[in-house]
Amino acid sequence: MKKLISIFIIVLLYSCSSNKNAATKPLYEVLLINNDGGANIKFYEVLTEPKEIKMLLGDHILRKKIKSSDINESNFVILNTGPTLETSNRVVIEKVIETPTQIEVYIKDNQKNIDALQTDDDTLYPYSVVKINSKKPIVIK
């Protein structure tokens, strides 16, 4: 009788156990691609400090896409392409590779930029914001 009860308890505990697999996050997510609104110089900036990342929460679009846990678990990259007359952002991330010591972000830049002194009302300033789901140092290549 004791064996039967113990087998029943073991089966009951086994059937109640959780078999959920934790969902793995992608290594990177493109949060925003905007065809205008960036700065007038070309630069790629890595945001790693919580104070820098909190600055992104001031944007009404990014505020909805960034969780409070992302501030301590993720880094962010801002890809600003500078002035152009093209109507779309042509800087793309080709791939992101995680090595044991760092994250390598490979960028392809096909943007035809113009001199900042030659800007007019038709000039656009595209930029992108990318979330890297790691706190390892980021190298842009």
Image (cartoon, rainbow, N blue to C red):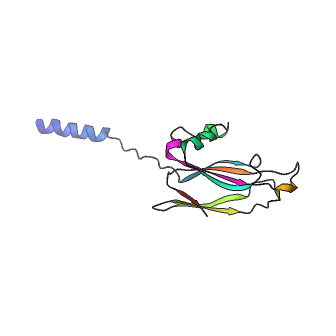
94 relative to 3, above or below? below
Query: In the visual, does 116 lie left or right of 105?
Result: right
Q: Nearer the viewer, residue 14 or 35?
A: 35
Is residue 85 visible from the viewing direction of this image?
Answer: no
Is residue 9 visible from the viewing direction of this image?
Answer: yes
Residue at left 69%, top 56%? 43
93 relative to 14, above or below? below
Q: Residue furthest left?
A: 1
Look at the image and say whether residue 130 sits in the magenta stretch.
Answer: no
34 relative to 68, above or below? below
**In the rendered view of the protein, which quadrant contains the N terminus?**
top left
**In the rendered view of the protein, which quadrant contains the C terminus?**
bottom right
Instruction: Tell me where residue 6 sits by quadrant.
Output: top left
Q: Nearer the viewer, residue 118 or 34?
A: 118
Give the magenta part as a residue range: 67-83
The x, y position of residue 32, in whole percent, is 67, 47
Instruction: Tell me where residue 64 sits by quadrant.
Output: top right
Residue at left 86%, top 53%? 119
Residue at left 16%, top 35%? 5
The x, y position of residue 118, in whole percent, is 87, 56
The x, y position of residue 139, in whole percent, is 57, 60
Q: Nearer the viewer, residue 139 or 33?
A: 139
The x, y position of residue 74, in whole percent, is 53, 47
Residue at left 40%, top 44%? 20
Look at the image and say whether residue 69 sits in the magenta stretch.
Answer: yes
